């Protein structure tokens, strides 16, 4: 699998909303500006909400992913414990398949 590849685990319909739970492959160097998911908008015509589980790298370091609707990219920021001041910077960590992102996307097909 390549960086950005999506694997759907569950798809469920709740009224007019579709909920998709899956994983996103991470591997290699993180590209500044974000990772493009292999399936645009997680397979939805409109994305209302995306949640990612943070990735714990060490006891005080975590990767915090967020979805940028304007660019359809996943940005990954790095937090270094309670001493981080100001906005979080994009990560410069090497990513491995062990760091794959689990996500939940909600929207309309």
Image (cartoon, rainbow, N blue to C red):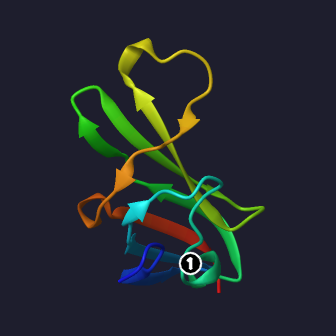
Nearer to us in this view, 94 or 65? 94
Name which residue lies at 28% across and 67% down. Answer: 97
Location of the C terminus by quadrant is: bottom right
Left or right: 80 with respect to 76?
Answer: left
State the image quarter where residue 2 is shown: bottom left
Name which residue lies at 36% across and 21% down. Answer: 81
Left or right: 37 with respect to 10?
Answer: right
Name which residue lies at 44% across and 30% down. Answer: 79
Residue count near mark 1 (Cα–Cα under 10 Å), binned few <14, some 14–19, many ≥20: many
Whole-percent x and y of residue 89? 57, 34
Whole-percent x and y of residue 98? 23, 61
Tag 1, which secondary structure? helix
Query: Residue at label 1?
Result: 42
Left or right: 34 with respect to 59?
Answer: right
From what the image shows, is residue 53 above or below residue 91?
below
From what the image shows, is residue 88 above or below residue 53?
above
Location of the N terminus by quadrant is: bottom left
Whole-percent x and y of residue 53? 37, 52
């Amino acid at each position: 699998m390549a960086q950005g590849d999506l694997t759907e685990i569950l798809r469920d319909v709740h009224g007019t909303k579709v909920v998709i739970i899956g994983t996103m492959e991470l591997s290699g160097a993180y590209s500044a500006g974000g990772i493009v998911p292999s399936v645009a908008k997680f397979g939805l015509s409109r994305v209302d909400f995306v949640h990612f589980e943070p990735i714990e790298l060490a006891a005080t370091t975590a990767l915090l992913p967020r979805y940028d609707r304007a660019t359809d990219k996943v940005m990954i920021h790095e937090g270094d414990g309670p001493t981080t001041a100001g906005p979080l910077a994009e990560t410069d960590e090497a990513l491995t398949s062990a760091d794959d992102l689990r996500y939940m996307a909600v929207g309309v097909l």
